Image: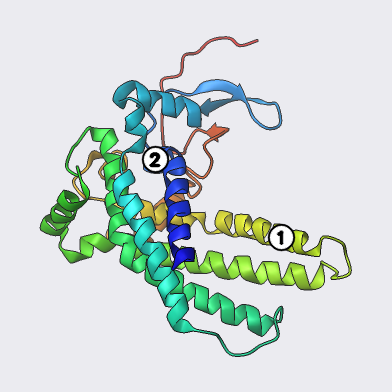
Amino acid sequence: MADTCGQVLLGSGLTVLSHPLMYIKVLVQVGHEPLPPSLGRNLFGRQVYQLPGLFAYAKHIIKIDGKAGLFNGLAPRLCAGTIGTLVHSRVLQVSGTSQKAEEGSLQHVVNETTKEMIARSCATIITHPFHVITLRCMVQFIGRETKYSGVFDSIVTVYKNEGVLGFFAGLIPRLLGDMLSLWICNMLAHLINTYAIDDSMSHTGEIKNCSQAVTGFFASMLTYPFVLVSNLMAVNDCGLAGGLPPYASIYPTWVDCWRHLSLEGNMSRGNSLFFRKLPVGKTYAIDQKRFF
């Protein structure tokens, strides 16, 4: 119980610190670009037009809503994090020990990954309604709406307008992305730890932890399109400007959303908040000057 409380407190602290980053990321994902691009240099030193990054976007939000505006949607996100941690911990306890297998073996990795997948999936399903409300509280910034003003009021609003299904908008791609990311990460880490790292090497434990972190990052990059599609479907056609044209088409299913983004070449939109290239299908009034 003490470990779970510690996880909740740590998770809540990280959630508060990372919330402005997620807020800006979500606005970029739905296509809100209030600032014009400027001429800069990419990683290879070539001059290209780029959209403003994280800090410029944050300054824009602060200018309109103040510093507190960077934390729109924080309350339901904290609820999701706290409940998710408790559910995840409880499911792992109930599942107990998996079938006996040699630690480090493929069977052991499969057993542990399966347990983790079930725990994560349960936590995701139960907390998804709060995730939907979080995203909609953020997207309200675009149209300056106040439709979702609090956790309980937002719950009533979603139920009145969309029924129970409204709480689970975008759930399927989110679950698929989570599961794929988990399996890719753990399987790649197992392959690296088994065939690329010699147990006789010094600092083997640190190297294996590093490989887990690297494979986790790689897996998150591969499965990012699922995150993007899930977030877009959570706000799609919900009565907010950010979920309606011109920011988004009306998608009957998440598969339609995936196809549309894929055809546009926008499957990575919002993945990076630095060195941001102009998204496909967007036009801007760029001040034409000579740069030296």
Give the farthest residue toward the right.
200
Q: Amino acid at mark 1?
A: Ser
Inter-mark Cα distance, 2 to 1: 29 Å
Where in the figure is residue 289, as x and y percent of width and height?
53, 10
Of the pair 172 and 104, the residue shown nearer to us: 104
Residue at the disc numbered 1: 211
* Lateral position of residue 114 relative to residue 250, left or right: right
* Lateral position of residue 132 relative to residue 208, left or right: left
Residue 75 visible to an observer of this rendering:
yes
Where in the figure is residue 136, as x and y percent of width and height?
27, 46
Of the pair 213 and 215, the residue shown nearer to us: 213
Instruction: Give the mark nearer the N terminus: 2 vs 1.
Output: 2
Q: What residue do we see at 18% from left, 38% from top?
A: 146
Answer few, some or many: residues within 10 Å of disc 2's Cα (few below 14, many 20 plus, some between 14 and 19). Answer: many
Numbered badge on residue 23? 2
Instruction: Assign a secondary structure to mark 2.
Output: helix
Q: What residue do we see at 50% from left, 54% from top?
A: 224
Residue 169 higher or lower than 77, as above or below: below
Q: What residue do we see at 39% from left, 40% from top?
A: 23
Residue 107 higher or lower than 48, as above or below: below
Of the pair 272 and 125, the residue shown nearer to us: 125
* Lateral position of residue 198 relative to residue 174, left or right: right
